[in-house]
Amino acid sequence: MPEAERALVTGASGFVGSHLIEYLLSNTDWQIDAMIRWRSPLDNMSSFLRNPRLRFLYADLLDTVSVDRAMQQSLPQFVFHLAAQSFPRTSFDAPLATLDCNVQGTLRLLEAIKTYRRSALIHVCSSSEVYGKTPAHLLPIKEDCPFHPASPYAISKVGTDLIARHYAEAHGMKIMVTRMFTHTGPRRGDVFAESSFAKQIAMIEAGLMENPVMVGNLESTRTIADVRDAVRAYHMLVTVNPQPGEVYNIGGAHTCTVGDMLRHLVSLSSGKNFLRMREDPSRLRPIDADNQVPDCSKFTAHTGWKPEIKFEQTMKDLLEYWRARVRSHPVINR
């Protein structure tokens, strides 16, 4: 019997990485190599940590030797490169660390693949943040929309995007790039607006925090996807007639402002009649990426993928996730 195919997932313990591995374990017979740092928390992976098809490889994108070693150990047929410093607000405080991890880290990984597993199908995760401040006349955003990054994180993702396309063209590597628009759901980090709102609401409900809910910019427009739809798209990217060198926008179907998301979460709360909000200057970016509304027709036409999970279900599941976290960890940082 031939050996099962193997996939390597970088950033495996993160929000998207953990959902992707959960999806692959449930929907393929692949062996999964989860690339994590030695200090990575494994909370997001608790439900499948003991799966016999899952193996952990310890590496850090900042360390070439460890990345090379992980690639030699894995020799995968598929690589999903999700690891990144992924918090736009943090990138203003740590721009050099963000650029090193996201740009040079991607280069280190692609060099390792080129050396040890050039035949792999590779998904490099860029971001809709590369489009940044998009004027209204260019909406919805197509893949040929000009880049106008609005944060050091977004600049780092422009670098990631371009490096991936360079390696595809210059070295004939089987690389595809996705620019995922806003996606959320259970396990979303609390540095992101909607997850921070859900966490604060859950804490207020439990009596662990007083009003108000602290907020940043509520006027930015976002098109929301569920993370579980996103990882299904990533699997289809490498299995439905994959096209090396292509770039795809992927995103949801529900467009709203950040304030609309907050108001919907509040409507789900037992304290909806008394919840208030207050702007926290520390939550504001020096410049924001507005009008993040995607045109995903290219990816949909190629794969048949479309979002299936409704916005209302995503918000409900996100709030329930934080309610469960608050119940099990009553001492939780604001």
Image (cartoon, rainbow, N blue to C red):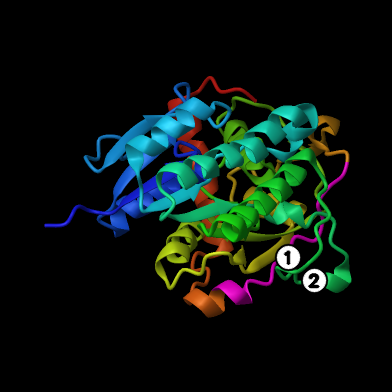
Residue at 79% across, 35% down = 283
Q: 2 and 181: which one is in front? A: 2
Q: 2 and 125: which one is in front? A: 2
* Residue marked by disc 2: 139
Mark 2 surroundings: few (<14), some (14-19) or many (≥20) residues within 10 A: some
Residue at 34% across, 40% down = 74
In the structure shown, which secondary structural element does the residue marked by tag 2 occupy?
Answer: loop
Mark 1 surroundings: few (<14), some (14-19) or many (≥20) residues within 10 A: many
- Left or right: 228 as drawn, with respect to 45: right
Q: Dividing the picture into quarters, in which one does residue 245 lie?
A: bottom right
Q: Position of residue 81 (x, y in %)?
A: 51, 46
Quadrant into which the C terminus falls: top right
Residue at 73% across, 50% down = 158
Question: Label 1 sits on what residue type?
Answer: Val
- Left or right: 301 as drawn, with respect to 286: left
Numbered range of the magenta stretch: 287-299
Q: Dividing the picture into quarters, in which one does residue 101 lie?
A: top right
* Residue marked by disc 1: 293
Q: In the picture shown, does residue 229 fall above or below 304?
A: above
Residue at 75% across, 29% down = 96
In the structure shown, which secondary structural element does the residue marked by tag 1 occupy?
Answer: loop
Q: Dividing the picture into quarters, in which one does residue 239 lie?
A: bottom left
Q: Is residue 288 magenta?
A: yes
Question: Label 2 sits on what residue type?
Answer: Leu
Does the rendering let one see residue 56?
yes
Q: Is residue 267 magenta?
A: no
Q: Position of residue 90 (x, y in %)?
A: 73, 32
Q: CA distance from mark 1 to mark 2?
A: 7 Å
